[in-house]
Amino acid sequence: MKTKLIVPLLLFFIIGSVYAQDSQQKRIDSLRLELSKAKTDTGRVMTLNRLSEHAGWRINENDVCINYAQKALALAQKIGFKDGMAKSYNNMGNGLAQKLEREAALESYFEALKIFKETGNKQWEVQVYRNIAIVYQEIADYPEALKYYKTALKFAKQVNDTQRLADIYSGIGYVSMAQGHLNEALKNNYQAIDVYEKTGNKKKMARVYQNIGTTYMNKGDFAEAVKNFTSSLEIFEELNDTAQIAASHNFIGITYKNEGDYPKALESYYKSLKIFEEIDNKTGMAWARQNIGQIYSIRGNYSDALKNFNISLKLYKETKNLYGEADAYYTIGELFLNQKDYTNALINYSFSLEIYKEINAQQGIAYCYKDIAKIYFLQSNYTAALENYFTSIEMMETVGDKDGLAGCYSAIGAIYTKLNRAEEGEKWLKKGLEIHKEIGAKEGIKFAYEYLSKADSALGNFNSAYENHKLFAVYKDSLINEANTQKLTETTMQYEFDKKEAATKALREKEKEKMKFRYGIIISAFFVIALSGFLLLYFTRMKKKKEKQIFLANRQIMELEKEKVEAELKQARKDVEQFLNKIEEKNQLINKIVNELKQLQETYDDRKSELGRTLTELRNTSILTDEDWTHFLSGFDKLYPEFILKLRTIQPKITTSELRFLMLVKIGLSTKRMADTLGVSPNSVRVTWRRVKDKLNASEDDTPQSLLNKIENVTAEVY
């Protein structure tokens, strides 16, 4: 649901715990000594504020942070030191934000902003505007976050605050990614990289590379995603930032998972888990466990998936990470939903919803309501489903989640259609379809067309119902083909997955055994070496044997798949040939009747006009029925599976008659044969060609065939 958004949020909490505690403590001790020696109240306020920053915000001791800030504020108010008052409010805001007390944090930030405006301290205005934007970003109120980031950007440029300028670009990049504006996200993140590179801030460069990698992952460009996550990993290795090294491995694993390469994903997740365990970073361990559980869930191993999810949930609770806890409950809810265990799914979604409400995470709240509504929909409890979908829509509109909105709109349309309120259902379905098309969500488009067909049928709009059903079938077939390709890929990867999973588990068990029996291993080293040699030889032979079996099985699968495809193509060609033969037979029959009528016309002068009308009607008679066209379309789609979809993508307003014209051009029919096939005059075919030229922006020199050649070379946008 929220993979593209929750990952950076989790990273936010992991990053929060990796500051160097020892160096910070030395700085705190130095500031306490400085406080004891301060000779003026102004100096005491400034030192208290620095203590608030170091002892609180930078090492996550939030209550300490707030306590020092309150002391600084009280003294600053007493002596009328406005800059000191504003910085105290800002530090209190930092501490409250870290405690997830967001409303109180915003109140403190706005107090700080008000005073800095009075004193004209533009540099600190920049920082406070950015802090406000971060709070709105964390609660997924992205329009407000973007507003404050842009205000901060304007002032940062005015005062030439280079460092904060880069931080703001990075923030705008994150919000743009969350809103689905991926190109805008990349533009701002690359601007941040340029500034960080000039200032030599490698740590922040590496974090921005993580955001860029996440953006490319959301675009479906997995190669670029891995490239940027690897760049981040290399910098963190250079800086010896262990927690972020582990986080980078997790990001790489997520990319491989989204790409469908589960063995590599699992390998990266276990690398991450091992590092997080070594440094006892429980939040990171929870994140890695959750990702490992998702791989097991995808593979249908629900038992191991649930085991990892429960470990993740336990760790999040121990670290009081409410974001992680809510997401863990949500993931467990999804697991039960996939198994159609609606009772347990509802229980876990409800737990997740309560926590998201507590921390005011609007996107999390929206998706919980959406999936709870889905359960009620599947249980035919349409009243409860509608109530939850409408609640979800309110949240989705706030955070600007188009995918979530489209899903809710279409589901509401489907419910109204089922409740015999087809006219109302059709309106909602069209709203959903429009957004699904905009973002390229094929599954959503298929769902909308399916229920639009049912709604039109209920309203008596049978032509529209037929057209929508055909489009539903087109998208359904497209998704089935994608699923089959994925299934074949997964089959060929299964051996590698099992092998790596077994190897990883064996490695972990072996490490545990080493800790328990290290003295026994030393004593029996010679025996182990000898036995290992024997086992290595044995398992090498077994491995080669198994690899050969897998190779033969895969080759057999490929041969069977090839035979199946060839048989389908052969049948499709046969169908098209029969279609053309049927046209020829009907043409011959009509010509024979026309000739006989001409002879009768010459014989019976008194019936000339009547016979003339009959001849005209015969010439204009459609020689193919809808059943003929449906049969032809079936064979044509198998020969040219992307033809109709590509045309409708390029020009959604293309009509059925124009599509038929282009299909006949595709199989090589002349203008005369097209006219015979369609039961119209050659001039009508030429009129259709002119309409097609206008709609597809053909040049004057284009022929029907040259236009099709151009279309074939157009790469349709992939969603």
Image: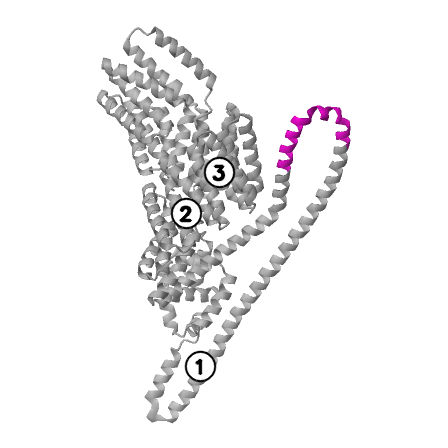
Mark in front: 1 vs 3:
3
The numbered dot on residue 225 is: 3
Q: Where does residue 342 sit, x and y in percent of width and height?
A: 46, 49
Front in this rendered view, residue 633 or 57: 57
Front in this rendered view, residue 177 or 61: 61
Q: Amino acid at mark 2?
A: Asp
Q: CA distance from mark 2 to mark 1?
A: 60 Å
Q: Where does residue 199 sit, x and y in percent of width and height?
A: 41, 23
Residue at horizontal 50%, vertical 25%?
A: 241
Q: Amino acid at mark 1?
A: Ile
Q: Where does residue 290 sit, x and y in percent of width and height?
A: 50, 37
Residue at horizontal 38%, vertical 39%?
A: 354
Crowding around mark 3 (Cα neighbors within 10 Å: few <14, some 14 to 19, many 20+) is: many
Q: Are marks 2 and 1 in contact (CB under 8 Å)?
A: no
Q: Is residue 85 left or right of residue 611?
A: left
Locate residue 10: give its quadrant: top left
Mark in front: 2 vs 1:
2
The numbered dot on residue 371 is: 2
Q: Main secondary structure of the magenta part?
A: helix
Q: Say above or below: 695 vs 551.
A: below
Circle 2: element type: helix
Circle 1: element type: helix
Front in this rendered view, residue 717 or 384: 384
Residues shaded magenta:
503-530
Front in this rendered view, residue 338 or 43: 338
Residue at horizontal 39%, vertical 72%?
A: 682
